[in-house]
Image (tube, grey):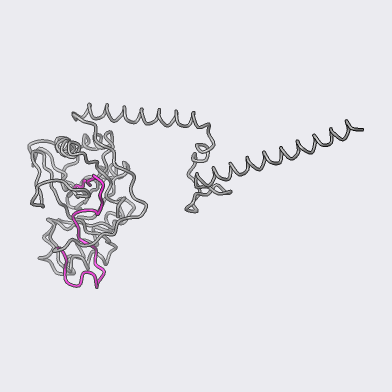
Amino acid sequence: MGVVVQNDKNRVVRRRVLRGSLAVLAATALASGCAAGTGATGATGTGVAPAAGQQQALHAPPARALDSYATKLRAEYAARVAAAKRWGLSKVPLTAPAPPRLKPRIHTRQGFEVDDQEELGLPPVFTRIPTDQKIVFLTIDDGAEKDPAFLRMMSELRIPYTAFLSNYLIKNDYGYFKKMQARGVTLNNHTLHHPYLPGLSYAEQKHEICDMQDIIEKQYGKRPTVFRPPYGNYNQDTLRAAKSCGIKYAPLWDEEVFVDHWEYREDDQDLHPGDIVLTHFRGRDDWKGTMPDMVRRFLKKVTDKGYAVARLEDYL
């Protein structure tokens, strides 16, 4: 009889231990889910479901997942080293940090305003993105030179840039810029014929800007929200016309890079975090070199000074 009682007691103790263990496991799983930012449905803390493959990574054995990630990083860096060597760079370009979730507020640079700019809600005119990170933004204007080597170089080096196109220079080869777009480059507005806009009426400026909006949308499937006035010249009519057909930003530049030299807007003649850099689609007809030559000069300076090249649209 004593034996039976003892066995019953043992079974009760085992059940209590099992229930306690399950509770601990459940609490651990819940804590892990919270730490990973996921809830019971697999949604992230932002309410957006993870992209395909993310959940598998969360539940993969930690050592295997870390080893796989490290292998991927080593392979990517090896590819960048090989690309830098192939394109004649002495250093591997630095990789830009992830863009901010909260975009910086962009204001018109002091001294670059037009009358009633804020009251009319006109696109801001700026030369720099507000940031403390050592990044710069490469922007390329017009579209005269269509160098296939340039496309390969930027793709292999993974250097982001933004294009501002004028129709009279690209209409003989829309396909070249379609290839550029397929590589992740945003194609923006630089007018139909690259005129001095302040010398035109409001209606003429609207034709130059808004008709270029239509052409880019027709050829490339997306209407730009970013516009650069030719030569950096504009007036209130320019910004009013641009706003009327969907433009939200009008970036200028702080530095301009050529194949054989740099030019600077600021007195210190140096780079700064968030600077926008201008260059042009040009080749040997206009320069003492090619677009890859220009890219080498550009990357040498920014890399030597500890800067990475970021994508402008990620900050707008």
Residue pictured at 49% horizontal, 51% vertical: 45
Q: Is residue 241 above or below residue 96?
A: below
Please tell me how many numbered marks the rendered image carries.
0
* 205 falls in the magenta region: no
Residue 28 appears left or right of 225: right
Magenta part of the protein: which range?
112-140
Point out residue 273 in the picture as x, y percentages from the top left corner.
21, 48
* 126 falls in the magenta region: yes
Q: Is residue 256 above or below residue 234?
A: above
Point out residue 197 in the picture as x, y percentages from the top left corner.
13, 62
> What secondary structure characterizes most of the magenta part?
loop
Residue 260 appears left or right of 56: left
Residue pictured at 27% horizontal, 50% vertical: 312
Residue 221 appears left or right of 58: left
For the C terminus, the image quarter is bottom left
Residue pictured at 49% horizontal, 39% vertical: 53
Point out residue 305 in the picture as x, y percentages from the top left corner.
17, 39
Residue 125 appears left or right of 25: left
Q: Nearer the viewer, residue 315 or 146?
A: 315
Please identify the residue farthest to the front as the structure is shown. Answer: 2
For the N terminus, the image quarter is top right
Point out residue 294 in the picture as x, y percentages from the top left corner.
14, 38
Residue 196 found in image quarter? bottom left
Please identify the residue farthest to the right as the structure is shown. Answer: 1
Q: Nearer the viewer, residue 68 or 246?
A: 68
Residue 149 found in image quarter? top left
